[in-house]
Image (cartoon, helix red, strand yellow):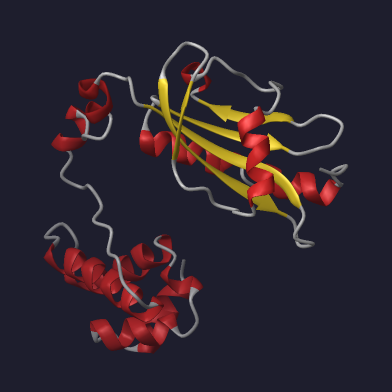
Amino acid sequence: MKKLTAEDEAILWAFENIVAGIAKNYGSHTEVVLHRLDVDNPCIMKIANGHVTGRQIGAPITNLALSKLSLGEDISEPYFTQSPQGKRLRSTTTIIRNPQNEAIGILCINMDLDAPFQDVIQQFLPSHQATEKTDTPVETFTNSTEEMLKNTIETTHQAVMMDKNITAGKKARILVQRLFELGVFNFKNSPQLVADVTGISVHTVYRHLRER
């Protein structure tokens, strides 16, 4: 380990939202821990669902997590451990490195295998409120940016064209507005792509963009 620099600390803090995001995805029975590998104080700097092992920010790094540094694997295979409370855990560790390839942190994921199955699976199912929604977005998985943009434009165009509450004279303007809000125009040559997909002239697209 080494004394962390300000740049090292900035890299680690960039993982703060990742910790929270992983925890939200896997639910309350999965602990996500970000360790800082500062030689003076190697400890937890961010933790989600700490009730799984009973730890909190500032707790020291574990001997097992520390041992992963010497194995030469930046991403471990899943391994099984036990919490202080006797819970069986399925864990992985990922080494975080700076541009100089120095290990500066560790991201650990610990899943509680003793959690009631019904509780775990319930967190992966949509809530009652979510199932009642009719405007749930559909995520499109593609292999190219152009394909993603085309799908977004086509889906939005179809929704605007079918909306009887939007008059014919306003459909092009509303379409451009919605595509803008979706971030479509952050991409190069997107106005021309919108024109090609929808049949609206590129001049009209630019005009409505200027009128925003």
Query: So how many labels did they put on this image?
Result: 0
**Foreground pick, 80 / 197:** 80
Specify whether residue 167 is in view.
Answer: no
Q: Position of residue 100 (x, y in %)?
A: 79, 62
Question: Residue placed at 41% from the left, 82% from the top?
Answer: 191
> Which quadrant: the N terminus?
top right
State the image coordinates of residue 63 (x, y, percent, origin top left).
Answer: 66, 29
Q: Position of residue 82 (x, y in %)?
A: 47, 21
Residue furthest out toward the top: 85
Of the pair 1 and 36, the residue shown nearer to us: 1
User: Which residue appears at 16% of the width and 69% of the height?
Assistant: 161
Picture layout, residue 107 above or below residue 33? below
Q: Position of residue 52 (x, y in %)?
A: 47, 19
Front one among 110 and 158:
110
**Left/right of residue 38 with respect to residue 20 in the rendered view:** right
Task: Name the residue: 66% across, 38% down.
Answer: 67
Q: Quadrant of residue 146?
A: bottom left
